[in-house]
Image: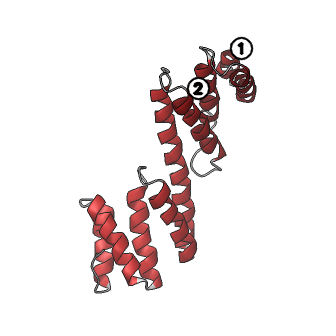
Amino acid sequence: LGVFANYRQGNYADAIAQAKRYVTLYPTDKDAAYAQYIIGLSYWRQIPDVTRDQADSRRTIAAMTEVVERYPDSEYVEDAQTKIRFARDQIAGKEMQVGRYYLERKEYLASIKRFRQVVEEYSNTRHAEEALARLVEAYFALGLADEAQTAAAVLGANFPDSDWYADSYKLLQSGGLSPRE
């Protein structure tokens, strides 16, 4: 496969195009899983830092999910799953960055939307804990006591020893509240 040469040289667009063509023409060939994996790796190599657009993270997830689902017995599945987890974490990190931006500007509804997305769609990333704490903060600021208490209860149930939970608990106490579901 000339695909690998393009990948190694950092010609990701060419590697992706060649690999896609190969997978389309020879979907059951012994090298098809590898070609699909190269597509995912090419996107993965282009994932920018969390402050930038995460389109390549989404493309990585899509391509690596193809590896996992279409070629479940291939040697590339384990690494594909690792790359998927990394890409999901990047997307969650981007949502957190935007959510914090809105929270700092007291645009609470916009921040809540971002933090809820992290909690609901990316709960298995390292950002879920902070997202729950930020939800407590934003709901509390809006005077939505029930929502703030529920978010704090979920945070406490999942991360009972965390600093985020301790801070959320103190915030609720400052308003005469405590976490409850």
Q: 151 or 26, which is in the foreground? A: 26
- Against 94, residue 112 (above or below) is below
Residue extending farthest left: 161
The secondary structure type at the circle numbered 1 is helix
Residue 127 as seen in the image, left or right of residue 40: left
Does the rendering let one see residue 66?
yes
Residue extending farthest front: 28
Question: Which residue carries the number 1 mark?
Answer: 2
Residue 173 as seen in the image, left or right of residue 12: left
**What residue do we see at 41% from left, 57% from top?**
128
Check whether the beta carbons of the residues at disc 1 and disc 2 lie within 8 A of each other.
Answer: no
What amino acid is labelled 2 in the image? Tyr
Residue 139, position as x, y percentages in the image = 44, 78
Residue 49, position as x, y percentages in the image = 58, 45
Residue 159 as seen in the image, left or right of residue 7: left
Q: Earlier in the sequence, mark 1 or mark 2?
A: 1
Question: Which residue carries the number 2 mark?
Answer: 37
Quarter containing the C terminus? bottom left
Residue 19 quadrant:
top right
**What residue do we see at 66% from left, 22% from top?**
27
Does the rendering let one see residue 48?
no
Q: 126 or 100, which is in the foreground? A: 126
The secondary structure type at the circle numbered 2 is helix
- Display coloring: secondary structure
Residue 147, position as x, y percentages in the image = 40, 77
Residue 102 quadrant:
bottom right
Q: 174 or 67, which is in the foreground? A: 67
Residue 167, position as x, y percentages in the image = 31, 69
Residue 113 as seen in the image, left or right of residue 2: left
Residue 10 quadrant:
top right
